Amino acid sequence: MKRLGISIYPEHTNQEDNFAYIKLASKYGFKRIFTCLLSVTKSKEEIIEEFKQIIEYGNKLNMETILDVSPRVFDQLGISYKDLSFFHETGAKGIRLDASYSGNEEAIMTFNPYNLKIEINMSTGAKYIDNVMKYKPDTDYIIGCHNFYPHRYTGLSMSHFLKTSKQFKTLGIQTAAFVNSQNASIGPWPVDDGLCTLEEHRNQPIEIQAKHLFSTGLIDDVIIANAFASEEELKKLSEIDPNLLRLKVEWVDKIPNTERKIVLEELHFNRGDVSDYMVRSTQSRVKYKGHHFEVFNPKEIKRGDILIDSSEYGHYAGELQIALKDMENSGKTNVVGRIKKEEIYLIDQIQPWQKFELY
């Protein structure tokens, strides 16, 4: 099951605003709350009093909270990895280890009597998760989550993200990553260049970031890292189907009705024998076999263009394609539209046999 989440930073916000944000997120189907103890300098008693109210309110709305901690926080609060009762008292569902122990400590934590989830930092790489697994944890209580990066140009590269995410996914571990609200400015630290896992997401619309993460097939939960995201952003995220990539179409003029139906009404999938030049959705040429497809817009093909072959192409007539590169048009293919500019780079995520929709 894939889920959406928000982040709350009680040391920088008031409870009334926090409760209102949690309630609004719940309205749009959000199920997770991330909150951070790394920047908190209060006593145990003050932390429990402050965080427990938020966590209990979230629990009532079926939103589970994970607390971000580290060995330094354990030392600061006088907590042993063998006794997680403090975190249980807050009502949290689990803890996220921003920094690591040796691997054995993490494994021991998974056997806590409170059934707290132990969330491992996915961004560190270096086979950290393999080291934890070596110590035989209770895998029912291991989950993973990437970091977010407040400083511009410090976010993860795509190659590192894919490598580390695959390490967790191969082990069947639930995964999460962060996206950046363009309307929020609150995080755990004073630096405010946005908060995101992938550097390339920093200035993108939030729904494009989430579509990208889900489309990799490696991320289960997408969490907004900064607070407070706008209601419009929450709504846009709630409308994403995490299991099906949907791409927005920008049309050319005067599209024939059949071509429009092919674009909008088919569940498309990329052929297994993939091309470097185009995504090919071929079922429409079977469905509309015998229909005469006129040549009406055989213009030069640009990356991101949506194409439908005319009857001049014989048995290819009616096949839908998405151009992955600029190409010469033979004069037999119609350009019927293009993928919305901000979403074009998502076409590179479409794998062999992957399903997608256009709207």
Image: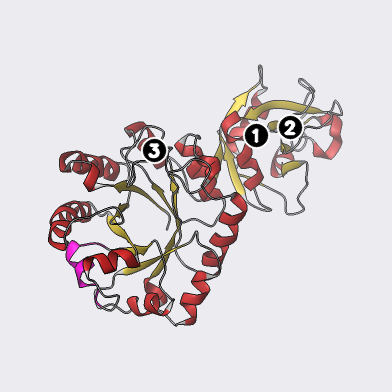
Residue where numbered disc 1 is placed: 262
Asked if residue 91 lies in the magenta stretch, the reply is yes
Give the mark nearest the N terminus, 2 or 3: 3
**Is 51 left or right of 342, judged from the image as shown?**
left
The location of residue 18, given as percent across then percent down, is: 21, 43
Residue where numbered disc 2 is placed: 308
Asked if residue 95 lies in the magenta stretch, the reply is no
Label 3: state its secondary structure.
Answer: loop
Please tell me how crowded label 3 is: few (under 14), some (14-19), or many (20+) other residues with Cα within 10 Å: some
**Is 13 left or right of 305, judged from the image as shown?**
left
Label 2: state its secondary structure.
Answer: strand
The location of residue 22, given as percent across then percent down, is: 25, 44
Residue where numbered disc 3 is placed: 192
Please tell me how crowded label 2 is: few (under 14), some (14-19), or many (20+) other residues with Cα within 10 Å: many
Label 1: state its secondary structure.
Answer: helix
Asked whether the viewer can see residue 281, the reply is: no
